Amino acid sequence: MKQLKNELKEYIRLNKLTPEMLHRLVDRIEIKEDGPPKIYYRFANDFFNA
């Protein structure tokens, strides 16, 4: 949680999402024909396994 908080503090003042920010926060995005996209965040595994 501490890592996520630090990452978000770094970007909170910015008005737009840059490719660098996206790559640091998102691990991967899966899109299937018959369903909505599923976004895997880099910090999610650390948060849920803590």
Image (cartoon, rainbow, N blue to C red):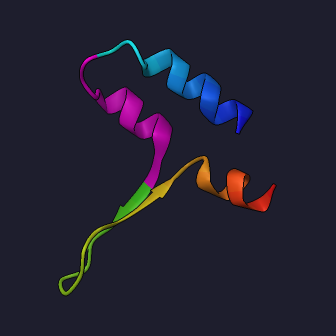
Is residue 18 or residue 1 the one in the foreground? Answer: 1
Q: Which residue is at the far top?
A: 13
At 60% from the left edge and 54% from the top edge, which residue is drawn?
A: 44
27 relative to 31 in the view: left or right: right
At 27% from the left edge and 72% from the top edge, which residue is drawn?
A: 31
At 28% from the left edge and 68% from the top edge, which residue is drawn?
A: 37
- Count every numbered label the image shows and give the total: 0
Q: Does the magenta stretch include residue 18?
A: yes
Q: Which residue is at the far right?
A: 50
Q: Position of residue 2 (x, y in %)?
A: 72, 32
Is residue 23 or residue 45 the one in the foreground? Answer: 45
Q: Which residue is at the far left?
A: 33
Q: Give the range drawn in magenta.
A: 15-27
Quadrant location, the N terminus: top right
At 68% from the left edge and 32% from the top edge, which residue is drawn?
A: 3
8 relative to 34 in the view: left or right: right
Residue 20, quarter of the rendered image: top left
Q: Position of residue 45 (x, y in %)?
A: 66, 58
Quadrant location, the C terminus: bottom right
46 relative to 40 in the view: left or right: right
Q: Where is residue 42 in the image (x, y as percent from the top left)?
A: 56, 48
